[in-house]
Image (cartoon, rainbow, N blue to C red):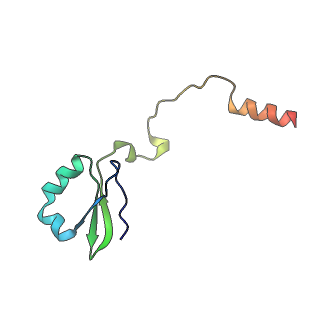
Amino acid sequence: MDHPYNIRGRFMQSVSIRDLTHGFSHYLKEVKGGEAITVLERNVPVADLVPHNKNLLYPGWKRNLKRRKIKGESFAMTTIKSRNEQ
C-alpha cells in the first residue's frame, strides 16, 4: 500500500477504526503535535486526521487575505502594450 508523506517527510501513520477508538486521546495528541494519521476500515483508507488549519474553513474568496502591492506596470497595461506591438 502506498503511504503519503506528511510535512516532516516521514510516513503518515495508519490506524484501524478499532484502534483509533480505543486509543483516541493518544492519536489526538499526535495530531496536535503535527502528525497526520490515515484511518483504515478493513485496510482501506477512509479518512485522514490532520492538524487543524483555520484557512481551510472558508473558500478562498471568503478568506481575509492581505493584498500585496507589486511595483511596476499592471498586468492589464502590459497585455494592452503587448497586443499593440503585434
Q: Looking at the picture, how far across and down is residue 74, in whole percent?
A: 68, 28
Identify whether 46 is placed above or below 58. Answer: below
Q: Is residue 75 left or right of residue 70?
A: right
The quadrant the C terminus occupies is top right
How many marks the image carries: the answer is: 0
Q: Looking at the picture, how far across and down is residue 35, in whole percent?
A: 26, 51
Q: In the orientation shown, which residue stands out farthest toward the front?
A: 10
The quadrant the N terminus occupies is bottom left
Q: Looking at the picture, how far across and down is residue 42, in whole percent?
A: 26, 77
Residue depicted at x 39% and y 47%: 56
Q: Looking at the picture, how far across and down is residue 32, in whole percent?
A: 22, 47
Which quarter of the picture shows residue 40?
Answer: bottom left
Residue depicted at x 20% and y 51%: 30
Q: In the orientation shown, which residue stands out farthest toward the top?
A: 71
Residue nearer the viewer, 39 or 65: 39
Residue depicted at x 79% and y 33%: 80
Identify whether 74 is placed above or below 9. Answer: above
Residue depicted at x 30% and y 47%: 52
